[in-house]
Image (cartoon, grey):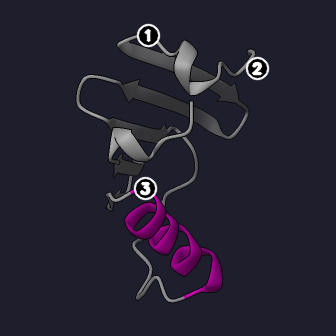
Amino acid sequence: METEKPAPHQWQPEHLRLAVTAAGVALWAWNVDSDQFTMDERGGPPVKEPKDLAGYGSKLVERSVSGQLGGAIDYEWSEGGLIVTLRVNRERLAA
């Protein structure tokens, strides 16, 4: 199930987006009041925490979130899925 993606200035205080695929369910939630974005994947194949997040993509995301957005990123790994939480500085988001 795909829907249009609103621009950040169109997001409601608690904006949700749900994607359902044969591999599982992914829920994206943005709480404008707390400047927090959460992605929660469930129902797919079991996941394990990697030994390290030293790959190019992981470094790029970490540097973008901390440097450009003045925030932090946290990963919560469980057998049931992955939860990624981004906290950003609202003043650094483009309108």
Identity, as a three-letter code, of the amino acid under mark 3 = Leu
Residue 33 image position (x, y, % from top left):
25, 23
Q: CA distance from mark 2 to mark 1?
A: 18 Å
Q: Nearer the viewer, mark 2 or mark 3?
A: 3
Q: Quadrant of residue 5?
A: top right
The amino acid type found where label 1 is placed reads: Gln
Nearer the observer, 7 or 61: 7
Per the image, label 2 sits on a secondary structure element best described as: loop
Is residue 30 positioned above or below 81 on the image?
A: above
Which badge, 2 or 3, comes first in the chain's sequence?
2
Name the residue that disc number 3 marks. Answer: 69
Say which mark, if any, is on residue 51.
Answer: none
Looking at this view, name the residue that lies furthest to the left: 34
The quadrant of the picture occupied by the N terminus is: top right
Q: CA distance from mark 3 to mark 1?
A: 20 Å
Q: Where does label 1 land, which residue?
A: 12
The amino acid type, in three-letter code, at marker 2 is Glu
The front one of 56 and 67 is: 67
Residue in view at x 58 percent, y 75 percent: 60
- Per the image, label 1 sits on a secondary structure element best described as loop
Q: What range of the chain is rendered magenta? A: 55-69
Q: Is residue 31 magenta?
A: no
Q: Which mark is residue 2?
A: 2
Relative image position of residue 19 (x, y in whole percent): 64, 26
Q: Main secondary structure of the magenta part?
A: helix
Q: Is residue 67 above or below residue 69?
A: below
Which numbered disc, 3 or 1, marks the residue that appears first in the sequence? Answer: 1
Distance between mark 2 and mark 3 Cα atoms = 27 Å
Q: Is residue 59 magenta?
A: yes
Q: Secondary structure at mark 3?
A: loop
The reply, left or right, for residue 57 in relation to residue 9 is right
